[in-house]
Amino acid sequence: MPPQRRRQASAHRPRTSPKRGRPGYDRETLVRVCVEVFNLRGYEATSMGVLAQELGISKSAIYHHVNSKEEILDAALTHSLSELERVVAEAEALGTPAVVELETIIRESVNVLTRSLPYVTLLLRLRGNSELETAALARRREITRRIAALIAQAQADGDLRSDIDARTASRLAMGMVNSIVDWYRPERADSSAPVADAVIDLLLSGLRRAAN
Amino acid sequence: MPPQRRRQASAHRPRTSPKRGRPGYDRETLVRVCVEVFNLRGYEATSMGVLAQELGISKSAIYHHVNSKEEILDAALTHSLSELERVVAEAEALGTPAVVELETIIRESVNVLTRSLPYVTLLLRLRGNSELETAALARRREITRRIAALIAQAQADGDLRSDIDARTASRLAMGMVNSIVDWYRPERADSSAPVADAVIDLLLSGLRRAAN
DNA sequence: CCTACCGATCGGTAGG
DNA sequence: CCTACCGATCGGTAGG
């Protein structure tokens, strides 16, 4: 009696590449569809049977592309974590003042979030129920730690106020950024730039009307 | 091979109340323990067998207290939603300027969040996979809507800047507040007041050092 | 001969 | 203790 979502394989563009082999899902497309289903129902709550139904193929056909359910999760986490780490590394390499690097990280993180929405959503909902998930959480914590260090540096530079703990500020800022996955819908937006602007504006200047 | 968490029933104080009946869990304590387990493993991924293990009683004993797994979820959601709705209603009844009511809501929401951490955590992780969850999500959206209305009013009052969309600001602000459940640990804090202060400060004034 | 896929079935575990 | 269902795997088939 839950309104069963009916999908056709044709709704997801399979491969476009060369001619060899039977037409159907390639691994990347299959992973993307599975990730979207995971986000709708929860990773552990999603059975291989449900994935098969949504994909429009049999359970065993899934095992042709991946070796296990966890391998699908792994592919999604690797995808999103690599992108987020790249954003931080590229900003740190700018050589600009910490406050500028911070703004770059926030803006680019919002971009990654909206561009790779299903993958990042899955990452942010992990609870650490396996070694794979624990490792992913550790990589997330390292990102938060590096942003906290940047905030502390910007405070030392005199660009950010020093009366808020850098670690708390880092967690709250990332919490605001990450919460975007809960309501952002790419099909309703031309670009994520206005959202990134609002986040940066809120975090740096606050909601209060400037004194005049 | 996952490091199985071992717990004793004695780790959770059962009832303290009168003498009648066999000593053991009362419904409230049982629900609280179950909610903590749900948060560790995910609601749907948590089997009744695992709950029984963690409680130190049999599966069938759980059915003495509740009629279904979903009834446990229902109790937890009712608890946290009622508290959050009360916070909003009490602030709205203050009759103070919207910006003051807004600050009250944020501060008291952080209080509810930290005081009822497991219940609110469970609420925030729902995906809408059942009618019960869908109804809870609708009540959450209504809270966000009322906060957006307060922000819009405060903008009209000239207390908040008008160049950020009230609905976006409401979502981002609640996103920041709610993200606290991901890292706040009551056993490491005397009170939640410093966290509430940091959130209000960040949201109203921002991170940037005041111009001088 | 490659890739994508199928039906059938295994041992095991879920909720009740 | 029952029934339904889980993830995983098999040998085999079909399109290109």
Image: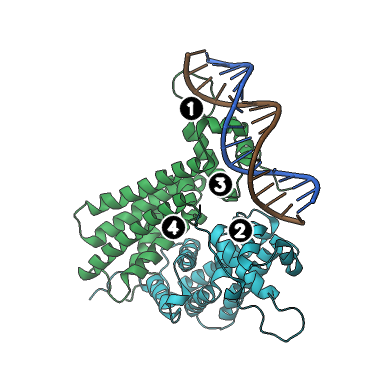
Chain colours: A green, B cyan, C brown, D blue
| Figure quadrant of residue A48 | top right
Residue B83, x across and y down, in percent: 60, 75
Residue B212, x across and y down, in percent: 22, 76
Element at label 3: helix
Q: Give the Cα distance between marks 3 and 1.
A: 22 Å
Dot 3: chain letter: A
Q: Which residue is mark 1?
A: A15
Q: Which residue is mark 4?
A: A178
Left or right placement of residue B82 versus residue B109 in this view: right
Q: Which residue is mark 3?
A: A38
Q: Which mark is residue B109?
A: none
Q: Give the Cα distance between marks 3 and 4.
A: 18 Å
Dot 1: chain letter: A
Single out the mark in the foreground, 2 or 1. 2
Q: Amino acid at mark 4?
A: Asn
Q: Give the Cα distance between marks 2 and 4.
A: 22 Å
Residue B206, x across and y down, in percent: 35, 70
Q: Are marks 1 and 4 in contact (CB under 8 Å)?
A: no
Element at label 2: loop
User: As displayed, is residue B63 above or below residue A114?
Assistant: below
What residue is shown at x 37% (from left), y 59% (from top)? A141
Q: Amino acid at mark 2?
A: Tyr
Quadrant (top left/top right/bottom left/bottom right) for the C terminus of chain A:
bottom left
Residue D12, x across and y down, in percent: 63, 18
Q: Amino acid at mark 1?
A: Arg
Q: Earlier in the sequence, mark 3 or mark 4?
A: 3
Q: Which residue is mark 2?
A: B43
